Image (spheres, rainbow, N blue to C red):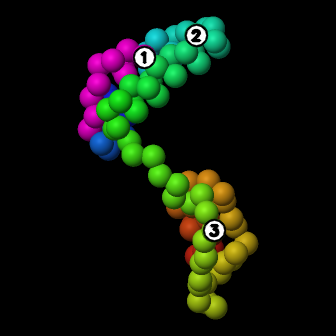
Amino acid sequence: RFFTDNPQNHSQIKDADLKKIADDAASELSEEKRKELFAQAQIKNAQNMYYIPNVAGAGTGWGAGQATLNNYGVYNTKSYGWQSEVAPFYWKG
């Protein structure tokens, strides 16, 4: 989805080589060969720097909320799922 016409391809990257690697990996039964294909995809991505690596969320952080905010601090995630796993519960009574 990250290098095709898929609507979730927000960066609009269309790379035929990456698409072929993804298609090959999706149909490959051998775990070792799939790992090899994923390594090829990582190398290709690094060469073109389509996505810049960052450490967002990897360090310490802080948060604040009003007393009227429900469930603050009750739901936590250490993932990128804050918007779907935590935020909806702030308004749940």
- Residue that lies at the very extreme toward the front in this rendered image: 47
From the viewer's perspective, is 17 left or right of 86? left
Question: Residue at the location (42% across, 16% down)?
Answer: 21
Which residue position is annotated with label 1? Answer: 21
Amino acid on which the number 3 mark rests in the picture: Thr
**Dominant secondary-structure state across the stretch colored magenta:** helix
Question: Residue at the location (64% across, 91% down)?
Answer: 67
Q: Percent x, y for residue 71?
A: 68, 77
Label 3, label 1: how far apart the Cα atoms are: 36 Å
- Which is in the foreground here, disc 3 or disc 1? 3
Question: Residue at the location (52% across, 11% down)?
Answer: 27
For numbered disc 3, what is the local secondary structure? loop
Amino acid on which the number 2 mark rests in the picture: Lys
Q: What is the quadrant of the C terminus in the image?
A: bottom right
For numbered disc 2, what is the local secondary structure? helix
Label 1 CA crowd tier, 10 Å (few <14, some 14–19, many 20+): some
The image's mark for residue 60 is 3
Which residue occupies the foreground of this view, 67 or 54?
Answer: 54
Q: Percent x, y for residue 40?
A: 46, 19
From the viewer's perspective, is 14 left or right of 90? left
Tell me which segment is drawn in magenta: 12-21
Q: Taking 16 as reference, is 55 above or below it?
A: below
Residue 68 placement: quadrant: bottom right
